Image (cartoon, grey):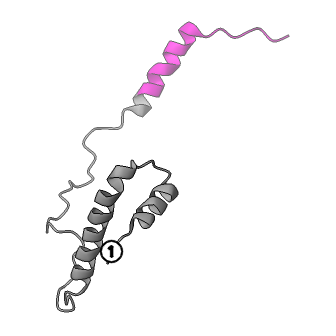
Amino acid sequence: MSISSKNVEEMARLARISINSKDIPSYSEQLSKILNFMNEMQSIDTDTIEPLAHPIEEVNATRADVVTEADIRQNEHQYANHMLDDFLYRSQSD
């Protein structure tokens, strides 16, 4: 498949990029090569090939979700009550 200079100009306009007019033949040739390669890839019979989810067959190595530290929040609340008495002042209600 061949990409014309007009196709390159239209793609540049749609992508809102500016292309130097002397570079258009180079872009046209490169895009044509890419499309030709894609056509070549489509002609390959892949019916017997099993699809891959990922090219590397590794299992996600995760650790068990186990509590490693004690919950100290209850103790912090006990200490916080004593500390608040030193810093907070209550106004006298009438």
Q: Quadrant of the N terminus?
A: bottom left
Check disc 1 and report the residue beneath it.
2
At x 33%, y 74%, the residue is 2
Question: Residue 57: x percent and y percent?
Answer: 14, 69
Question: Residue 78: within the magenta?
Answer: yes
Q: Residue at x 36, y 70 (%)?
A: 3
* Span colored in magenta: 76-94
Task: Assign a secondary structure to mark 1.
Answer: loop
Most distant residue in the front direction? 22
Viewer-proximal residue among 59 and 26: 26
Query: Viewed as shown, does residue 45 lie left or right of 90?
Result: left
Q: Residues within 10 Å of mark 1 (few under 14, many from 20)?
A: some
User: Toward which corner of the image does residue 91 lie, by quadrant?
Assistant: top right
| Foreground of the two, 56 or 40 | 40
Q: Find residue 69 and report its horizontal and vertical position in percent.
A: 27, 38
**Residue 44 spot, x, y in % from top left:** 19, 86
Apparent side of residue 36 relative to residue 77 in the rendered image (left or right): left
Q: Amino acid at mark 1?
A: Ser
Residue at screen point 20% across, 87% down: 46
| Magenta-colored stretch includes residue 70 | no
Whether residue 14 is situated above or below residue 36 in the rendered picture: above
Q: Main secondary structure of the magenta part?
A: helix
| Extreme residue in the left direction | 57
Residue drawn at x 85%, y 10% is: 94
